[in-house]
Every structure is written in structure tokens, then in C-alpha cells.
Image (cartoon, rainbow, N blue to C red):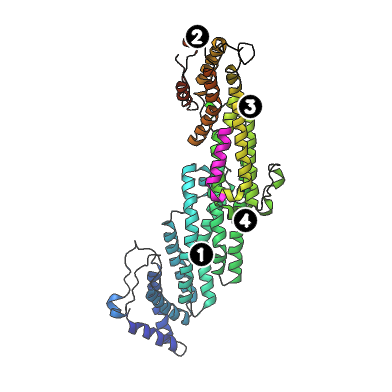
Amino acid sequence: MTADYLYAVDDAIAASGRSARAAAAVHAAMPRLEEEARSLLSSSSPSLRRLSLLSDDLGDATPDASPRHDGTLSPTAAAYVGAVAARMLRAGYGPELAQVYVSARRDALAESVSVLGVEAVAIEEVLRMEWSALDQRMRRWSHAVRAVVRTFLADERRLCDEVFASDEDLGNECFADVARGCVLQLLAFADAVAVSPRATEKLYRTLGMYEALADVRPELEALFSDDAAREFFAGEVSSTVQQLGSTVRHTIEEFSHAIHGEASRKTVHGGEIHPMTRYVLNYCGLLADCRGTLDAVLGDAGLDDTATDAADGTAASTPSARCLRELLTLLLRNIDDKSRLYDDAGLQNIFLMNNLYYVVQKVRESPPLRELVGDDWLRRHRGQIRQYETGYLRASWTAVLSQLRRDDGAAARPPAGHRAPSGPSAKSFNAAFQELYRTQTAWKVADAQLREELRIAVSERLIPAYRAFLGQGSRHPARHVKCSLEDLEDYMLDFFEGAQKFVRW
């Protein structure tokens, strides 16, 4: 097609009202124009062949119709399509142009979207999908919905405006038809996720999908000039946003029930951190990162702050803060219940200390989580750790230290002129320390700093008492005093490592 040919079409259109022959010429020209429009409009991705746009006929006038990186036509090519479309519209071939336009651009848009990895998936397939595959698709979807609205559909809107500059109503109708399939396909996947079985592992990704869709909703609605089309798409998007929000709320409720109802009777070896503690804190951190979206989802439907820890003197100010406080409160109550599964009171306190210390550290290390939970909460629970430490020292070491102070049932101070008899008390101390060493080297304090602090707390009580005991003298030191002060300090380094050891005297 040459430029002269286009001018001839213009002349024929202008004369068609006065001459049957001219009208016939216009009718004969339209298929060629339709094919030209279809060829131009089918450009969709860099992987397609470079379009051949009348290079032989138009020479230097041929527009650069190479597909751009975003899958749309270059501005020059779009203008050329607009010129072809204008001639078809002037000739009264609007329906034919609309059919060609919608078919070509709908296919081009679908191909561009498929590159993002969000091809159409039936709801039955989503329901059967393994979590690893679904997780990947949900992540891709959150990225794709932003790209589709802000890049692909925005460019389609601009192209449509240029092509149908002389008939805005038809352009609006064509754009809605082009966008409908793509948008409904995206929403269908989100709807399928929303109705699929709820699981905690889906919570973060579902929040991400909610955030992405809510984020682009105003921009998507703004693309539609026609009121009916805008209302249609707004309604579809709003429905999906509401479904995703409902799924998030119900998943959090079920998560809360699961924490509260986790009643396994199996103790964690050595009083270490319970897997539930790690799991809950992981999700609390993820939820804190999405606190703005979580506030929007929960809104007035957030968890009731009256259910939070009654000792909390700082009122939560947002739905997300109330939610996270509730989850942490439920976790710590459950951990307290699980501590009673240990017969040894010292190990109960080690277990409580391990888990609460882990919670406090995770909250401190996450600025969003710390902001939501509050420094008052942190201070109060750090104080609780110290109480567990005191409980451990009292339960495990009171009896041992008493062996260093008693005198075989007599008064603690020996008679004047006599050395303290070490036999019975030294033997008792040796036996008590050997038993503690055997059991508590198998106990595990996972955090190195907490482990060192606990050893120091023990040593501050044990070493001075043992030094004073040795200073009293002994009638049979070789027989009864088995451990030097230096040996005792070395033995303390083996405590809380999670590897049982035995004293060899």
C-alpha cells in the first residue's frame, strides 16, 4: 500500500456519496485496510517477527513498527494505525474496525500477560495445586497485576485513544472488550485462591495479593471513561478484594485457634525453643511487614483488644497491633502450659526462658514488629526473663549450695579451735554437683548470650560459696574434696550445651 493509495481512498470516501462507482471503490478498499490494521495491531512482544509495514510501497514514509519492550506499537506505528482506522470510520466501517481491533489487541495482550507466568488456570486446578507451585503463582500474580494495569492496560488505553480519536465512544467500547478477558482472568485466579482451603502458609501471599489488587484498583477504574464499563470492572475488583480480605481474616482467626489449641504432649529435648514459637514469630514478622495492608483488611473486624494480655499497660492503637499482641499472648500462654510437661522445675524455667528470650529478641530485631508491640511490652517481658532465671537458680542450685554451708547437721560455724569437718558436706556436694552436671549439660540454651548470662548467674553464687567452703579447711581433703576451684569453673562451661556429660572424679 502506497501513500498515494491512502490518498485515493480518501478521495473515494469523499466522493462515495455522489457516485456508485466511488462507493464500490471504498468497499473494495476496506478489506485491504482491515488486513493492514490487523497486521499492525497484532504486534505484541519482542519475540515476534518485525512487522513488514509497506516497506516496498512507502519507502521512507514507512513507520517504525517494531514492537516495544512493553509489547505496544511505537508512537509512529500507532499514529499510522490511527490513519488507517480514521479512513475506515469515515467510510462507515466502524463495526469491522472494532472487530479487527478487539481481536488483534486482545490476543496481543494475552500473549504479553502470559510472559508474566499468569496464564489462565481453572479453579479446580488451583484447588489441587501443591503449595510450592501455588506459592510461586501467587507471588507472580501480585507482580503481574501491577504490571498489567500500570503498563499493559495503560498503553492499550493510549493506543485505543489514538486509533479511535474520531469516535471516542467506539474506542471506549473496544478498550473495555480488550481489557475484559485479561482482567477477569486475573480476578478468577484470585477468587480461586480466596475459596481454596485456608492455611497459615498462604496468609502472607494472600495479603500480598490483596495489597496488589487494592493498590491498582483506582488506576484500573480510571482507565475506563464509560460509566457502565467502569462500574462493571469496579464491581468485579471490589468483590475479589473483599473475598481476599475475608480469607485473610478467617485465616488469622484459624491461626489464633491453632496456637491456642496446640496441645501436643511431647516435650522439646533439653528445654529448647519450641517449633511453634519459631513458626508463630516467623508469621508475626511477616504480618508486621504488611501492617498497613493488615490494618485495611482487619479494620473494624480486627481481633478484640480486650482479649489481649490483661497486664499490658499500653493500648494497641491499630488493628494490626491488636492482632499481633493477641497472637503473641496466645503463644506465651501455650508455652507456659507446655512448661508443665517437664518434671524438673529447673528445666521448666529453662524452657520458659529459652522461648520468651527468643520472642523478645525477634521483636527487638524487627522494627515493624517492635513498633506494633511496643517498648513497654518488651521491658515487661525482659523482666519476666529475669524472673525465670531466678526460678531456675532457686529450683536447681539452692540444695547444692546448702551442702557447702551445712556441717553434717550441726551449726554452720565450727567450734573454736576446730577446722570444719568436710567429709559429709563435701560428699553431699560432690554427689549433688555430679547429678546437676549430668542432667544440665544435656539441657540446651540456644542463644549464646543468654547461655553465658546464665552461667555467670550460677557462677556468681556457686564459686564464692565453694571458695568459702574450701577456706574452712578439711580433715580429709584428699578423700573428700574432689574438685578445685579452677576445675569447678571449667565444669560450668559445659552447662546448657545440649550434650550430656559426666563428671569423672
The answer to whether 60 is drawn above or below residue 310 in the figure is below
- Tag 2 and tag 1, C-beta contact below 8 Å: no
SS under mark 4: helix
Dot 1 falls on a residue whose secondary structure is helix
Question: Is 483 drawn above or below residue 495 in the view shown?
Answer: above
Asked if disc 2 and disc 4 are in contact, CB closer than 8 Å, the reply is no
The question of residue 355 being in magenta is answered with yes
Say which residue label 1 marks: 179
First in sequence: mark 2 vs mark 3: 3
The amino acid pointed to by label 3 is Arg
Q: Is residue 280 visible in the rendered structure shown here? A: no
| The C terminus lies in quadrant | top left
Residue corresponding to mark 4:
296
Tell me: residue 250, above or below residue 8. Answer: above
Mark-to-mark CA distance, 4 and 1: 27 Å
Write the start and end of the magenta stretch as one range.
353-368
Between disc 2 and disc 3, the foreground one is 2
Q: Quadrant of residue 73?
A: bottom left
Per the image, the residue denoted by label 3 is 340
Query: The disc labelled 4 sits on which kind of residue?
Result: Ala
